[in-house]
Amino acid sequence: MTGEAVGAVAAAGAVSAAIVGGSGYVGGELLRLLTGHPGVVVRAITSASQPGIFAYNAHPNLRGVTDLKFTSPETLEPVDVLFLAQRHGDSAKQIERWAGLATRIIDTSADFRLRDAAEWEKWYEEKHPAPEWLGKFVYGLPEFHREELKNTKYASGVGCNATVTNLALSPLVGRRSDGQTVRRIDRVVADLKVGSSEGGSIASASSHHPERSGAVRSFMPTGHRHQSEIRQELGTDFELTFSVTSVELVRGALVTAHCFLKEPVSERELWQLFRKTYAHEPFVRLVSARTGIHRYPEPKLLAGTNWCDVGFATDADDPRHVVVIAAIDNLMKGAAGSAVQCMNLMCGFDERLGLTFPGLHPA
């Protein structure tokens, strides 16, 4: 965005925003993004456990960037946009109260990701606290629901593992603007490698340094909840095997998806398909290098960014077998970044505003 365009946004009047549940990793990323957003003024960031403490004590990278202190959620005053960065289940329990405090709500938890209450109960093993609200939230993945997000007051969070897998598979599923799909795949075996920040900021036995360091630990070889979002967004008429492995990363999710096609497709046709799907997407990049060490998507290069990098490899011995590889920063494109991207669409901003950090190399 040009300096003139940024100035025009600021001159038009910034929207007020608040973050509920701001002491966690996603809350910290939201604060980092919003304090650098020319169209937003952050009025409050809440923490039930740390009221009165400077936010930079929990998020030391923001020292000198903001002097906001955490406040109690009970003292929250009305704002234009409310970000909910709470634990799963907490947002839905108070959604009526939150709706009374903000014109627009973006929830980063799993509470409103699924449209069907029975499906939510199946995957989260409890009754949904506010099933009547499920239909009011638009699934917060702009690449799939851009026009709906422009016209909604409520956007849901996105599962990080679901996000990277949905974006990897979308060209082969053939999503169309009318909501219909053309299937090119019969079966997918998706293996995900994920960083420790997926577990959140509260320490656990599995995140204890001696247990996590050097680990390549199978976390969910079957039954991961994010499958429900993939099924919701891409349909159910192909076989999906989905496994998740914890590796020694802090940020990042990498999916290696073995896709078995209905009919053989040439490498040239695949590139045409992927380019057509993502030609106009501001935060999806196709990785096509034939030499060097970065020929395929690499999460390390995406730390702090809202990009999803996508690439693929064909199998010379089996023309029906294509391996699609995609990478994101789970805290960004898989959470806070997509949330701010949704806000931009909901508020009429340039979709890229506040999200153009290109990452670091080396890092």
Image: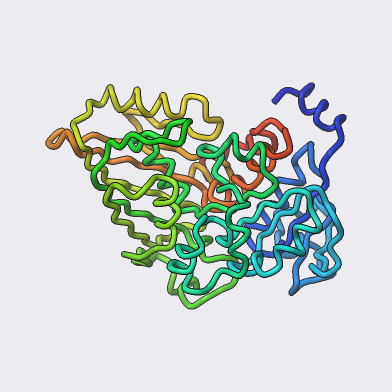
Q: Position of residue 84 (x, y in %)?
A: 68, 59
Q: Position of residue 27 (x, y in %)?
A: 68, 58
Q: Position of residue 276 (x, y in %)?
A: 41, 24
User: Is any atom of residue 241 visible in this view?
Assistant: yes
Quick check: 267 left or right of 27?
left
Quadrant for the N terminus, please: top right
Q: Nearer the viewer, residue 80 or 17?
A: 80
At 30% across and 53% down in the image, what residue appears? 240
Whether residue 162 is situated above or below residue 199 in the rendered picture: above
At 32% across and 29% down in the image, what residue appears? 291
At 79% across and 42% down in the image, what residue appears? 40
Name the outermost residue toward the front.
132
Quick check: 135 left or right of 235?
right
- Colour pattern: rainbow
Name the outermost residue toward the bottom.
205
User: Is any atom of residue 295 visible in this view?
Assistant: no
Quick check: 65 left or right of 260?
right
Whether residue 114 is situated above or below residue 309 in the rendered picture: below
Quick check: 11 left or right of 62?
right
Q: How many labels were placed on the picture? A: 0
Q: Position of residue 338 (x, y in %)?
A: 59, 45
Q: Nearer the viewer, residue 30 or 227?
A: 227
Name the outermost residue toward the left.
317
Q: Nearer the viewer, residue 34 or 303?
A: 34
Q: Which quadrant of the view contains residue 298? A: top left
Q: Nearer the viewer, residue 271 or 177?
A: 177
At 25% across and 26% down in the image, what residue appears? 267
Q: Which quadrant of the view contains residue 172? A: top left
Whether residue 361 is situated above or below residue 85 in the rendered picture: above
Q: Which quadrant of the view contains residue 344? A: top right
